[in-house]
Amino acid sequence: MFDLTNVGFQTDGKNPQTLLSDISVTFPAQKFTAIVGHNGSGKSTLLKLLARKTTPQEGRILLDGHDLATRRIREFSRKVAYLPQNPVVPPHITVRELVGFGRYPWRGAFGRYRPEDYDKIDSALAMTHVAEFSDRLVVSLSGGERQRVWLAMLLAQDAPVLLLDEPTSALDVGHQKDILHLISDLKDRIGLTVIAVLHDIDMVGRYSDHIVALRNGRICWQGTGQNFMQEPTLRDIFQTEIGVIHLPESNRFVSYIA
């Protein structure tokens, strides 16, 4: 879906800082791509460029073969759904109301919902297992429940591409696994393209089809989860001593600080 060629981005001001440089990458359709790297490597900046929250000063970004900058906002929102870090929860809104916001690209803020809109909302609630508390206030939910509600809102948007900025950062390890398992399952079931910024090495290796690693604003490695979970690769990406254990009688690997 996304093709980037020689993309670069700098901050504004008298002393601009280069955050991304010479980024050339194709994100495969209907796959789960993880963007990884140390803090400050440019991961969230890259995702914001894909989400059109910022504009590159250099290079070109194509979506389905068309320049990203030429897409109309509503047309783009019907293609791409974006979840930033720590989205703000309105204090007096229910789960169903929040999920319904996903229909705005199709009906507008004041458009009247049609039967197909309610069907999309109900389907999104069911797929993310939050239908049982659809009438509760979002602020009353636990962190894991709330994250599934945000995901339901993206699904109601009915966009084939999901951009997720650290979707598990505020969750304990059990809820991290649940959310990533759900995202991976939805990707397979309904053919989503998922691009997510992630930090947990083991979760990246377990759930990602494709991995793009950044260091100092440049791509330093990309490949599959199995190739990612190798000691030389991890040590080069993260610039620290990392060991890897292959779990017996499985294709899974776990990492540790050596």
Image: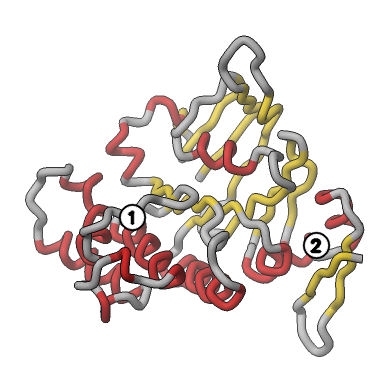
Q: Where is mark 1, residue-wise? A: 89
Is residue 249 found left or right of 114 in the rendered image?
right
Q: Is residue 212 above or below residue 253?
A: above
Q: Vertically, is 126 above or below 82? A: below
Q: Amino acid at mark 2?
A: Asn
| Image disc number at residue 255 | none
Observer-nearest of 76 and 91:
91
Pointer 1 local density, CA inside 10 Å: few below 14, some 14–19, many at least 20: few
Residue at 25%, 45% (x, y): give it.
105
Give the percent coordinates (x, y) of residue 171: 54, 67
Q: Horizontal and vertical percent for residue 184?
A: 53, 69
Q: Amino acid at mark 1?
A: Val
Q: Secondary structure at mark 2?
A: helix
- Label 2 Cα neighbours within 10 Å, binned few <14 / some 14-19 / many ≥20: some
Horizontally, residue 140 falls left or right of residue 94, namely right
Using the image as rendered, state which of residue 186 and residue 180 is in the foreground: 180
**Comes first in the chain, label 1 or label 2:** 1
Q: Which mark is residue 227?
A: 2
Q: Quadrant of the C terminus?
A: bottom right
What residue is drawn where x is 68% and y is 63%?
A: 200
Residue 19 point in image, percent of width and height: 66, 29
The residue located at (66%, 14%) in the rendering is 15
List x then y, in percent, for residue 220: 79, 42
Name the front one of labels 1 and 2. Answer: 1
In the image, residue 100 sits, relative to residue 16, either above or below, namely below
> Which element type, helix, strand or loop, lies under badge 1?
loop
34 on left or right of 111: right
